[in-house]
Image (cartoon, helix red, strand yellow):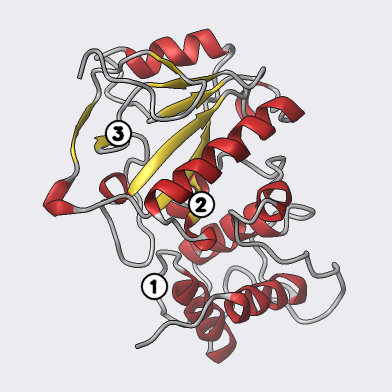
Amino acid sequence: MSGFAAEQDGAEVRVSANFGPRRDGKRPDMIILHYTGMRTGAEAEAWLCDPASEVSSHYLVHEDGRIVQMVREADRAWHAGKSSWQGETDVNSRSIGIEIVNTGHGLGYEEFPEGQIDAVTALCRAISRRHAILPERLLAHSDVAPGRKIDPGEKFPWRRLAAAGIAHFVEPSPLCAGNSLALGAYGGPVEEVQSMLEIYGYGIEISGRFDQLTRNVVEAFQRHFRPERVDGIADRSTVDMLSRLLDALPRRDS
């Protein structure tokens, strides 16, 4: 892969050894956003290109907005790990991975700089155009790996990307008192929430029991769409937002 030209205008190229072919003829129809969770961008860039790490992404976006491409979009980068979305378990073969330099929750979790978000937005817009990726397929790592990953986290400004027309988003429903579902709940209302989450795309078992997996998925949903309170409890605000997001999905022929 040496000598490939950057596919994003203005991007630098630093080739990672950690990639392979997309499997079974699959093409990218998702973008997965991550944060690096390391002390510096230089450290993260070196790690993503180190064969010993066995991880990579297609792009890395530094705090100052500088973009580095490490894997060609036609190839399969190793960024999502064990994950799923809408029944697809080989997310790496169906996605473009973007790492965003940020210390993450374990090292202080800083706000994302304006210039960095501008660069991420422009990059996602260009990728979406190249591969006809729908706004509802621009996802967080935590969406495809709930309970295992929490990046890019509740500070990531999804509203900004939605305003650019490249992310799916509705305004958060107000926090309010009322019926809620939490660990240990069971029955029809739990099954209904699980079904809604599964229809949206999350990997969840429709069991009618609010188990740890269900809590993890609800927390991932909140981290993306209702970051004001991330507690894994399916309260009225969470369920209302989920319903409105499902209603806002484009209708497709069956």
Q: For marks 1 and 2, give the CA distance.
A: 20 Å
Going by the numbered disc 2, the residue's amino acid type is Leu
Separation (CA) of disc 1 from disc 3: 28 Å
Q: Earlier in the sequence, mark 1 or mark 3?
A: 3
Secondary structure of the residue carrying numbered label 1: loop
Q: Which residue is mark 1?
A: 205
Q: Could you tell me residue 249's position as x and y percent?
A: 55, 75
> In front: mark 1 or mark 2?
2
Q: Position of residue 239 (x, y in %)?
A: 67, 76
Q: Residue at x 56, y 39 (%)?
A: 151
Q: Is residue 113 visible?
A: no
Q: Residue furthest bottom?
A: 188
Left or right: where 157 falls relative to 92: right
Q: Where does label 3 land, which residue?
A: 77
Residue at 78% x, 64% y: name it.
172
| Image location (x, y in percent) of residue 251 | 49, 82
Q: Name the residue type under label 3.
A: Ala
Front position in the image: 183 or 227: 227
- Which quadrant: the C terminus? bottom left
The image quadrant where one finds the N terminus is top left
Q: Is residue 124 left or right of residue 245?
A: left
Mark 1 in CB contact with mark 3 (< 8 angstroms): no
Front position in the image: 223 or 166:
166
Whether residue 51 is situated above or below residue 130 in the rendered picture = above
Q: Which mark is residue 139?
A: 2
Q: Amino acid at mark 1?
A: Glu
Q: Give the mark, 1 or 2, whose residue is nearer the N terminus.
A: 2
Q: Residues within 10 Å of mark 1 (few under 14, many from 20)?
A: some
Q: Position of residue 65 (x, y in %)?
A: 63, 22
